[in-house]
Amino acid sequence: MADLSSSARKVQVALEARGFSFEIQELDKSTRTAAEAATAIGCEVAQIAKSILFRGKESGRAVLVIASGVNRVDEKAVAALLGEKLGKADADFVRAETGFVIGGVPPVGHDKPIETFIDEDILAFDAIWAAAGTPFAVFRLDPHSLAALTGGRVARVGLPPS
Ligand code: 5CA
């Protein structure tokens, strides 16, 4: 913990505050994208929990989708659950809403509460990995903890590659 960068430490504190003992690891290889993270860790890309931010088109509120690394987010499915169409989030919006930079956005520990959806495909694995605040930090967790950890709703919000 003492060795973690300040952004990773914020995530470690948030995990502990929710009663989880998952340990953040800072690697010397980039984990900025799901593919890079899988290579650095030595796991399947599908085992990477991507945190993708959207912006409600009318409300402007942030919406987080945690998806399996191989899937695309089914924006129509998320919009239907939300009752609002989705717009894109740019890098500044991501930073302002979460407190983290793209490539390091974690599933928890954001500066503001964010409505969250969890891609049900991520539950197929015994272990998954999520970003932990920087493009070099990750933590390993069991996917069934994601809902309790984030307060998110598990739903069919991922589109597998064809
Ligand atoms: N650290 C890895 C997972 S361990 C990670 O954060 N992967 S990610 O997929 O969740 O984050 C990268 C995502 O950020 C991309 O899938 C993409 O949706 C988003 N992104 C990348 N560049 C931009 C950009 N310029 N503007 C908005 N979103 C972007």
Image: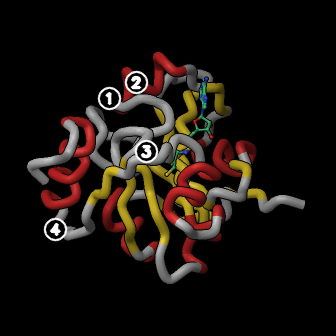
Amino acid type assigned to the residue bearing label 3 in the image: Glu
Q: Marks 4 and 2, how far apart in space?
A: 26 Å
Mark 1 lies on residue: 99
Callouts 3 and 2 close, C-beta under 8 Å? no
Q: Residue furthest right?
A: 162
Q: How crowded is the residue under tag 2: few (<14 C-alpha within 10 Å), some, or many (20+)?
A: some
Q: Which quadrant would residue 145 be assigned to in this image?
A: bottom left
Q: Is residue 124 above or below residue 151?
A: below
User: Looking at the picture, how far across and down is residue 70, in whole percent?
Assistant: 71, 58
Query: SS at mark 1?
Result: loop
Mark 4 lies on residue: 19
User: Looking at the picture, how far across and down is residue 12, in whole percent?
Assistant: 21, 53
Residue at image x 57%, y 25%? Answer: 89
Query: SS at mark 2?
Result: helix
Q: How crowded is the residue under tag 3: few (<14 C-alpha within 10 Å), some, or many (20+)?
A: some
**Residue 36 left/right relative to 107:** right
User: Looking at the picture, how far across and down is residue 15, in whole percent?
Assistant: 22, 58
User: Looking at the picture, how far across and down is residue 59, in whole percent?
Assistant: 51, 23
Amino acid type assigned to the residue bearing label 4 in the image: Gly
Callouts 1 and 2 close, C-beta under 8 Å? yes
Q: Marks 1 and 3, how far apart in space?
A: 15 Å
Amino acid type assigned to the residue bearing label 1 in the image: Gly
Q: Marks 4 and 1, how far apart in space?
A: 22 Å
Mark 2 lies on residue: 95
Q: Which quadrant would residue 162 be assigned to in this image?
A: bottom right
Residue at image x 72%, y 56%? Answer: 71
Q: Is residue 10 above or below residue 91?
A: below
Callouts 3 and 4 close, C-beta under 8 Å? no
Residue at image x 31%, y 57%? Answer: 25
